[in-house]
Amino acid sequence: MSDPKSFVSPLTESTRRRMRDLHGGLLRLHKILLDNERIAYEKVHGKVETSGQLLNLVMYDQWFDWLHRISEMIVQIDELMENEEASLDDAYKILAALRGLFQHAPEDPAFGAKYRAVLQREPAAVLAHADVQQILILDS
């Protein structure tokens, strides 16, 4: 009997490069979104004095909760790239999840609403979003 893993397609170098590009694009997008949300937060709650205070807010305050979806996807890409046994199927699952998140966010309407609001007010977010979308639509 054959080993079931023998039918799994390993990550190709082009897919690894695509995932690295996606990782970088998501990091840039996340930073823009975080900076934008920080400004909005400070208008309501006052200045965030330290990076430690901001980190605490990002991790535990509901204001920033919607950004966790992108953070989680960045971590998934990190784990994929570190896993020597990662497959094309693993990469395609991440790509599909990101397409769903950015195109409709059906399982998380709060994310979609907040994300669209930032895109409406922040041109840098639109550009970063377009960069990520370009990577996501490659031979999708």
Image: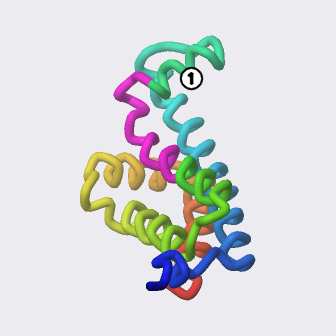
Residue assigned mark 1: 55
Q: Residue at x 45, y 64 (%)?
A: 98
Q: Amino acid at mark 1?
A: Leu
Residue range (magenta): 60-73
Say few, some or many: other residues with alpha carbon within 10 Å of mark 1 (under 14 / 14 to 19 / 20 or more). Answer: few
Q: Residue at x 48, y 65 (%)?
A: 94
Image quarter for residue 11?
bottom right
Q: Quadrant of the N terminus?
A: bottom left
Majority secondary structure of magenta residues: helix
The answer to if 139 sits in the magenta stretch is no
The extreme bottom residue here reads: 139
Q: Nearer the viewer, residue 126 or 59?
A: 59
Q: Residue at x 59, y 66 (%)?
A: 86
Image quarter for residue 101?
bottom left
Question: SS class of the residue under badge 1?
Answer: helix
Residue 7 place in picture, x, y as percent: 51, 84
The answer to if 63 sits in the magenta stretch is yes
Q: Nearer the viewer, residue 1 or 128?
A: 1
Q: Residue at x 48, y 55 (%)?
A: 119
Q: Report if residue 123 is visible in the image.
A: no
Q: State whether residue 91 is above or below residue 123.
A: below
Residue 122 place in picture, x, y as percent: 55, 50
